[in-house]
Amino acid sequence: MTANVECQALLRTANRLFRFDDHHRARALLEIMSDVYPDEPQVWAALATMANDDTEMTTFLARASYANRLSALPT
Amino acid sequence: MADAKEILQLGIEAARDGNREEARNLFALLTKQDPTNIQAWLWLAGVSDNASQRRNALERALQIDPQNEMALRGLRALSGNTRSGGTERNRSFIAAARERTGALFGRQATPPAKPSRVSRQVTEVPLAPEDELTDALDTFDEEYDDEPRGPSPLMWGVLGAIALLLIVFLATQFLGGSNSIGNFVASSTGLSDKSVSDATAVAATIESIAATASPRATMTPAIPNTPTPMPAMLLDLTATLTSNGLGYGVRDPLVAGDRTEKLSDVPATGRYFVVVVLVSNSSGANKAIPADFFVLKDDQGRNYTVNVERSNKLVDIGGGRGVVTDVAAGDELPSDSTPRSMALIFDVKADASNLRLYGSGNPTQGWQIAASVQ
């Protein structure tokens, strides 16, 4: 739960960077987050918004979808 | 690694701006990604909000570099810290930190010539303006005093009493009761007859001055006959809304910029903009999201509706439903309350700014998506 709180806070930081047109650091932050929180769909979805091309975006969205399905599984 | 340095710098900036929680999250992220990132551990120690976390961070730094002088001194300061003597010890720790950052940024440290290993290691990574790390440690040192922060309970009490009196004063003015202030003072404070009499006289004087200064009628706020539209409220990106059994929300930050390469068979009049939303259906009957359910608005006063054909095209390009997103725009949603991702494409004017997304029938609650389409 704590990790999730931290993840949400970091997503807000990435979002703020994105809104202030600091796309480079927003993406850098999200890439590190995807290492640390690979099962967090929001991280992949956010990365998809900053993809450099369609192939990359498709990959990120696929990861988001996969992580979303994982999170929907009963624990 | 370049990314890690940038995020370390971002954390340092957050610490410098006083946003310690954000800095803590960023440094903690770096230590999770690379547990041997000694700079991240040291900075994490600098912005930790308690001694236990700080000790842990310094110990981890020492595991990486057992000779790390800053970590050693920090731990010494921590182990000797007590309420009575902690501040003095922390000052020595901070002096050591300053000495180290002097070497870090090429300044002549006092006394000079610290062990070559330390200065070599630090000069390799000039990460922040001088003294910022020690500033972070200064802040931590102040917190070591364990003094309570913010207004004292007495101050809160005084502020509360003032607020209560102000509210009652305004209420009595609106109700227009004679000598109402004095009555309130008498009833609420239990003053003697003379005091009550004095208070009543003062109240009467105040009321007469008020009556002279402006007619009592002006105390009644003028209510315009025309209804004022409710201002739009922007929601946190994690918030979800419901309309007619359809739940919807935005995945943060979820804006894809210009993605026209694969959609160029039908060029956008402006720029294609992708927003991925989460939708769910708990209405009791299977149904599709209407094409005009989502509206994107800009500061230029324009409204954009979803281009269903382009949205479906994007899903097809990506490999179909369940790959890029769970469903496509216009798909029928089963009534099982399960959130499903859906990519929406809007054809947005290139000069659009401050884009907000709204759901059907709720123009007062939406999400800010992007400052521009650039």
Image (tube, coloured by chain):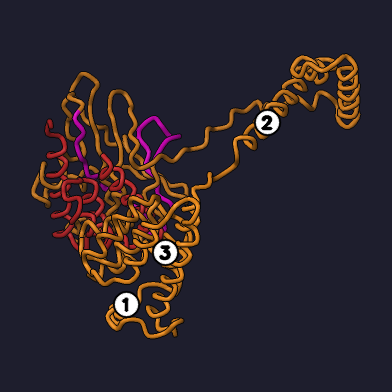
SS at mark 1 in the image: helix
Residue B129 percent across, percent down from the top left? 43, 74
Chain ID for orange = B
Q: Chain of mark 1?
A: B
Q: Amino acid at mark 1?
A: Val
N-term mark: 2 or 3: 3
Residue A57 percent across, percent down from the top left? 18, 56
Please give the residue where the numbered disc 3 appears in the rendered image: B13
Please give the residue where the numbered disc 1 appears in the rendered image: B122
Q: Is B332 located above or below residue A5 in the figure?
A: above
Region in magenta: B338-366
In three-dimensional space, the C-alpha distance between marks 2 and 3, rounded to whole angstroms, equals: 38 Å
Q: Nearer the viewer, mark 2 or mark 1?
A: 1
Which residue is rendered at x = 22% and y = 27% of the image?
A: B281
SS at mark 3 in the image: helix
N-term mark: 2 or 1: 1
B223 sits left or right of B73 in the view: right
Q: Are marks 2 and 3 in contact (CB under 8 Å)?
A: no
Q: How many marks?
A: 3
Locate the N terminus of chain B by quadrant: bottom left
Q: Is B29 located above or below residue A39 in the figure?
A: below
Please give the residue where the numbered disc 2 appears in the rendered image: B163
In three-dimensional space, the C-alpha distance between marks 2 and 1, rounded to whole angstroms, equals: 54 Å
Q: Amino acid at mark 3?
A: Glu
Q: Please tell me in which quadrant of the rendered image residue B103 appears.
A: bottom left
B159 sits left or right of B32 in the view: right
Q: Nearer the viewer, residue B217 or B306?
A: B217
Q: Is there any visible trace of residue B373 in the rendered image?
A: no
Chain ID for red = A
